[in-house]
Image (cartoon, helix red, strand yellow):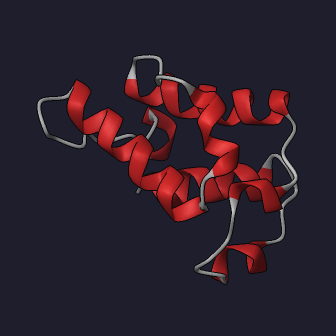
Amino acid sequence: MLEEIIKNYLINTKGKDPALFTNPALQVAELGLDSLDMVEMLFEIEDRCGFQLPDPTRYPKMSFRDMLADIEAAIRAHNGGELPDLRLEADK
């Protein structure tokens, strides 16, 4: 679910080509996000999970998969090991 939320945000809001996400070695830097784009993307997740993610400046240096894993780990750590339903009420 987390991956779909981030991909949909990047495709629908930032105009990224969906074909980018078929590359398993995709690097966050290859998405061409500036710092404001990155902050806006993370706000989307933070709004859904209810807390601020730690040190978002490290994400541009990661692969897309590593970023997803890192964000999921932070969410699980904040929620006692659980991954809560991150869909907005409008999405349910």
**Relative to 5, is 11 on the left or the right?**
right
Q: Residue 79's quadrant in the figure?
A: top left
Q: Quadrant of the N terminus?
A: bottom left
Position in image of residue 39 (x %, y %): 71, 27
Residue at 52% x, 60% y: name it: 4
Position in image of residue 59 (x %, y %): 61, 42
Position in image of residue 3 (x %, y %): 49, 59
Q: Of 30 and 86, which appears nearest the observer? A: 30
Residue at 50% x, 38% y: name it: 90
Q: How many marks?
A: 0
Is residue 49 depicted above or below 81 in this figure? Answer: above
Position in image of residue 42 (x %, y %): 61, 32
**Relative to 56, is 51 on the left or the right?**
left
Q: Residue furthest top?
A: 51
**Relative to 56, is 14 on the left or the right?**
right
Residue at 70% x, 45% y: name it: 60
Q: Of 6 and 76, which appears nearest the observer? A: 76
Q: Residue 18's quadrant in the figure?
A: bottom right
Residue at 36% x, 45% y: name it: 72
